[in-house]
Image (spheres, rainbow, N blue to C red):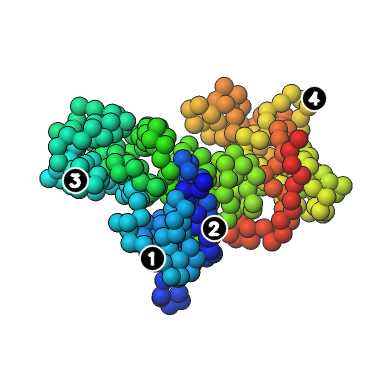
Amino acid sequence: MSAVRVSGARKTFPSRPPVVALDAVDLTIPTGTLAVVLGESGSGKTTLLRALAGFERLDDGTIELGGRVVTSPTVNVPPERRRVGIVPQEGSLFPHLTVAANIAYGLPRSRRRGADPRVADLLDMVGLAGLAERYPHQLSGGQQQRVAVARALAPEPEVVLLDEPFAALDATLRGRLRNDVADALREAGATALLVTHDPAEAMSLADLLAVMRAGQVVQAGTVRDVYLRPVDPAAARALGEVVALPGAASGGVARTAFGQVPSGPDADGAVQVLLRPEQLALVDADTGHPATVAAVEFQGHEVLVDLVAGGARARARWPAWAEPQPGTTVHVAIASDPLLVVAEYIDSRGIADVGIDLPPSP
């Protein structure tokens, strides 16, 4: 059974011109799944979250939570009756209440007084055992967000909605906290939807990843599928750096200065082959194509290497121990099937005018 099902969701905000925030959005989240919606500012991800919570009324479409219709052209269940837990960007804890009281506030009114055992269980789950009597001002930003997660989980909601909950934290704390929060959500067996603009955050957390653009979910699937099999160049770039190599396709093969790849039967003529930087592998001279190292960017555990071959430029990502020197010649091979092979012309938004389907990897 799906915990969340969004079908044909549409929402337009009046302005000049009108802003289409949601444009026929479909999204299904199975029970117990941690789903992440990734998109740039203005993509519609926050409007989708607010519609799920009941804070925005759709113009059209339906939303089901736990098999119950909560939004449709004739139904609009208010937020307090949707069984949805919400974790906002900065916790929004009650400053006059202790940690325990903040968590208990998420419980039914009859259970807020006294020491409800669920509060202690949740404190332990989010790693805050022993801090029940502290106040929000006595906690770090990361601890406050843990309390907000515990409060959202307290009433055992159908779904927990997290609105960029780590955005205000520094990078080191953000990485550690998001893993702890994900562990807590999974331990609770919760279904959750988190929205973010950070691809690293999305990939580290998601069981199900949905990419939004211009009010639409353009692709949804596992992180591996979306990263390695994007539906178009813009979806590829949403998850990280992309290398676009000019090439020529015929007979099901696209040839580039760095090697050849399968292109599918429909590709013919000038194309661009889209890869991730790590797909350009450093190999021996007898198995690769020569390339000149134009520049090297050292990043600690890895190096980014700008390469030139046959007039084409590309960026490779290699482990730091393989760092080459600028001006030297190395040999490179394309290590796996490309993300996409597309018609040569790509517009200023990074979207190809023609897409070519690739055969599945063996």
The label number, if any, that marks residue 153 in the structure image: none
Q: Is residue 332 visible?
A: yes
The label number, if any, that marks residue 26 in the structure image: 2
| Distance between mark 2 and mark 3 Cα atoms | 38 Å
**Label 2 sits on what residue type?**
Asp
Residue extending farthest to the right is 251
Residue sitting at x 76%, y 30%: 288
- Does residue 152 lie above or below 13 as drawn? above
Q: Position of residue 332 (x, y in %)?
A: 71, 32
The residue where tag 4 is placed is 286
Residue sitting at x 42%, y 36%: 189
Q: Give whichever of discs 2 and 3 has the lower sequence position.
A: 2
Q: Position of residue 58 (x, y in %)?
A: 43, 67
Q: Is residue 302 left or right of residue 286?
A: left
Q: Give whichever of discs 2 and 4 has the lower sequence position.
A: 2
The residue where tag 3 is placed is 110
Judged from the image, the secondary structure of the residue bearing numbered disc 3 is helix
Q: Is residue 89 left or right of residue 311?
A: left
Judged from the image, the secondary structure of the residue bearing numbered disc 1 is loop
| Distance between mark 1 and mark 2 Cα atoms | 18 Å
Q: Give whichever of discs 1 and 2 has the lower sequence position.
A: 2
Q: Give whichever of discs 1 and 3 has the lower sequence position.
A: 1
**Label 4 sits on what residue type?**
Asp
Q: Give whichever of discs 3 and 4 has the lower sequence position.
A: 3
Q: Position of residue 319 (x, y in %)?
A: 57, 26
Residue extending farthest to the bottom is 16
**Label 1 sits on what residue type?**
Asn
The residue where tag 1 is placed is 76
| Mark 4 neighbour class, 10 Å CA radius: few under 14, some 14 to 19, many 20 or more | few
Q: Are marks 1 and 3 in contact (CB under 8 Å)?
A: no
